[in-house]
Image (spheres, helix red, strand yellow):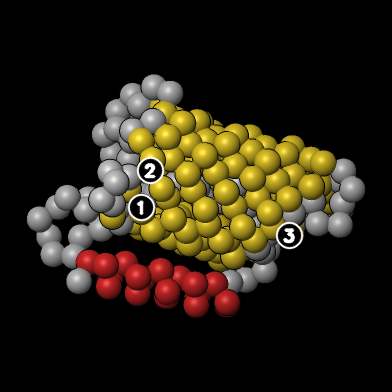
């Protein structure tokens, strides 16, 4: 039953992506599940985005409490139709509110949080601020590794500012659907599709360093 719930939820996210509003989108993707790391634990994730705007990024994730994680993200992006490579910066946090180990029927890992991203593109800059919901479920394989399908939905305000001109703001929607593969207690791989204006494939490798 739990598998059916997760698969149905991910299918719903993918279908919903077809109506996602066009926007600048994230240069980082999601590249994480809804499970918190735990107080004082840290990891580093290197990621690439093969999307409308190609990007390379590094993300440091730290456990602020047993249920809360915070991430600092820094990357470089080759913008849409822009020959210059620009830098981009982001912050996000997630609070795990459901745990798959709960005794509740059909429980999953579920987290809610917020996100912030900034990128300068030529004479313009884009600022994104909003909230997000993540869901995932870990399947332990016979070889001891863990596969975790996950999805993220975000709702954010995108503000586009032009040099010397007025700025404009729009409410945008986006989603990510992917799978995390925990190979060991210190190493995991991620692959996902993003649909939020910067549509494409995002890949990542996570290393637990603390």
Q: Which residue is under mark 2?
A: 182
Look at the picture and state if 5 lies above or below 77.
below
Q: Which residue is under mark 3?
A: 52
Q: Position of residue 176 (x, y in %)?
A: 51, 60
Q: Which disc, if any, is residue 200?
A: none
Q: Secondary structure at mark 3?
A: loop
Depth check: 164 or 158 in front? Answer: 158
Instruction: Answer with the quarter of the image where residue 61 lies.
Output: top left
Q: CA distance from mark 2 to mark 1?
A: 6 Å
> What residue is shown at x 47% (from left), y 44% (from top)?
189
Q: Secondary structure at mark 2?
A: strand
Q: Which disc, if any, is residue 147?
A: 1
Q: Earlier in the sequence, mark 3 or mark 2?
A: 3
Q: Earlier in the sequence, mark 3 or mark 1?
A: 3
Depth check: 74 or 57 in front? Answer: 57
> What residue is shown at x 60% (from left), y 46% (from top)?
28
């Amino acid at each position: 039953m739990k598998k059916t719930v997760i698969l149905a939820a991910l299918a719903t996210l993918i279908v919903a992506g077809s109506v996602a509003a066009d926007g600048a989108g994230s240069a980082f993707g999601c590249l994480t599940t809804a499970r918190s790391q735990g107080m004082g634990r840290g990891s580093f994730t290197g990621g690439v985005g093969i999307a409308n705007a190609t990007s390379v990024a590094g993300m440091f994730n730290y456990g602020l409490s047993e249920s809360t994680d915070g991430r600092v993200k820094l990357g470089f992006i080759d913008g849409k139709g822009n020959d210059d490579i620009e830098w981009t910066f982001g912050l996000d946090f997630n609070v795990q509110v459901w745990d798959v180990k709960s005794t509740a029927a059909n429980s999953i890992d579920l987290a809610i949080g917020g996100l912030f991203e900034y990128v300068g593109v030529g004479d313009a800059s884009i600022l994104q601020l909003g909230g997000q919901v993540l869901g995932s479920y870990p399947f332990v394989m016979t070889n001891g590794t863990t596969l975790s399908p996950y999805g993220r939905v975000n709702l954010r305000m995108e503000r586009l500012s032009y040099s010397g001109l007025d700025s404009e703001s729009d409410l945008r929607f986006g989603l990510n659907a992917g799978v995390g593969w925990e190979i060991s207690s210190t190493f995991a791989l991620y692959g996902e599709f993003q649909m939020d204006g910067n549509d494409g494939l995002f890949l990542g490798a996570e290393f637990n360093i603390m």
